[in-house]
Image (cartoon, rainbow, N blue to C red):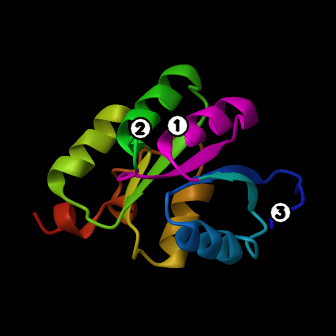
Amino acid sequence: MLNRPRPHSVRVLLVDDAPVYTDTLELLLAGDDRIEIAGKAYDGAEGLERAFDLRPDVVVMDVHMPGLDGIEATRRIRAELRATRVVVVTSSPTRECEARAWAAGACAFLPKDAGFLEIAAAIAGPAGTRADQPAFRTATLAQA
């Protein structure tokens, strides 16, 4: 159920090996006029291929996936598609994982259980926004 193109919307690619997560996120984001779901992928290699084909504005990337993990996929996307922002999500946010995501070029790092409004804000935020602003930081580092 990919969205119809919306003028001036942020085109998003969802990448996660858990279809229930991508499907749920797609349903939630479908009601946000700022966001258009351009595609989905179910592992890092497929996500990389889809990103190069679709050239989305934003990729929502899971960290832990079989084969090519989300951190390396993020690094490769950011190296080739400089205008594409990557929002990294994970079910196990740690300081090490977050540091690796920033080093790979992520624009945001969020736990998968972040609220819908926080995820939508990270996706639809203005290009060039550094996601190390407090609204886009994980609880692990916010408590440090």
| x then y, percent, for residue 123 | 58, 57
Q: In the drawing, does residue 99 fall left or right of residue 137?
A: left
Q: Say which element carries label 1.
A: helix
Q: Quadrant of the N terminus?
A: bottom right
Queried whether the magenta region covers residue 52, the answer comes back as yes
> Marks 2 and 1, Cα distance to the nearest angstrom?
6 Å
Q: In the drawing, does residue 73 fall left or right of residue 20?
A: left
Amino acid type at image mark 1: Ala
**Residue identified by numbered label 1:** 45
| x then y, percent, for residue 137 | 31, 60
First reached walking from the N terminus: tag 2 or tag 1: 1
> Marks 3 and 2, Cα distance to the nearest angstrom?
27 Å
In percent of the image, x 44 and y 37: which residue is there? 74
- Does residue 35 lie above or below 106 as drawn? below
**Residue identified by numbered label 2:** 68
Where are the magenta residues, as a range?
42-65
| x then y, percent, for residue 144 | 10, 63
In the figure, residue 56 lies in which quadrant? top right
| x then y, percent, for residue 139 | 24, 69
> Marks 3 and 1, Cα distance to the nearest angstrom?
23 Å
Queried whether the magenta region covers residue 24, the answer comes back as no
**Residue identified by numbered label 3:** 3
In percent of the image, x 36 and y 40: which residue is there? 71
Pointers 2 and 1 in contact (C-beta within 8 Å): yes
In percent of the image, x 29 and y 64: which residue is there? 138
Please, which residue is most extreme toward the top here? 80
Amino acid type at image mark 2: Leu
Between 34 and 30, the residue placed more toward the observer is 30
Q: Say which element carries label 2.
A: loop
In the figure, residue 33 lies in which quadrant? bottom right
